[in-house]
Amino acid sequence: MYLIKTEWVDKAKLDGDKQLMTSLRWLSEKRPHPLYRWLRARGINCTPLVMIVCVQFVYTVCVSAPMLLIYQSRRAHLAYLLFVFVACVHNGANHYFEAFAEQYTARLAAAPKSKPSTYSTTCWSLTVFVFFAVLALSSLVVSIEFAISVAS
């Protein structure tokens, strides 16, 4: 779909306006892909489009290959689901940590220097946090136990 959109449907528009950023332009001009730089350093001149398509094909094959094993084995499926769950929680937590850290830093920079901070942790916020943490962990444990009982 990407190739159809960028190489046929909107080719004239994209060729006419170099300010429009596509992922192909990004990976070849703005922030060149490490493989693209490596090939260029070795004197191999392939078009960025061919390199990106080949890398995407290899990536798709490598990611799709273990799916048959995961599909056939309940334990592998459960392990994969847990891995995806943990990865999603980790990425989400990192995003919010970075976003809140930036907002907090901006708030500190904009706040007057003589006024003491009024942000404090209340008993209610700790109670809510503990409640949702226990709820999330207990639902995860119940899900794992259910999946193991079904697999047995």
Image (cartoon, rainbow, N blue to C red):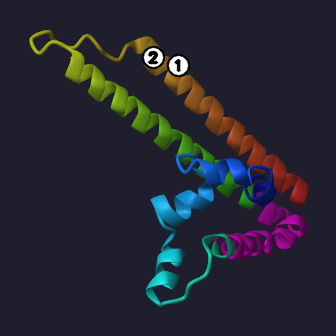
Q: Is residue 22 visible?
A: yes
Look at the image and say whether residue 78 sits in the magenta stretch: yes
Residue at the disc numbered 1: 128
Q: Position of residue 136 (x, y in %)?
A: 64, 34
Seen from the viewer's position, the closer of residues 148 and 1 is 1
Residue type at mark 2 is Ser
Q: Is residue 131 above or below residue 143?
A: above
> Which label is found at residue 117?
none
Residue type at mark 1 is Val
Which residue is located at x 9 percent, y 11 percent? Answer: 114
Q: Is residue 140 left or right of residue 126?
A: right
- Work out which quarter of the rendered image holds the N terminus and state it: bottom right
Seen from the viewer's position, the closer of residues 36 and 111 is 36
Q: Which residues are magenta?
A: 52-79
- Work out which quarter of the rendered image holds the C terminus and state it: bottom right
**Magenta-drawn stretch, dominant element (helix, strand or loop):** helix
Q: Is residue 36 left or right of residue 137?
A: left
Residue at the disc numbered 2: 125
Callout count:
2
Which residue is located at x 49 percent, y 63 percent? Answer: 29
Q: Dot 1 lies on which element?
A: helix
Q: Which residue, as the protein is rendered here, is positioned at the far left?
A: 114
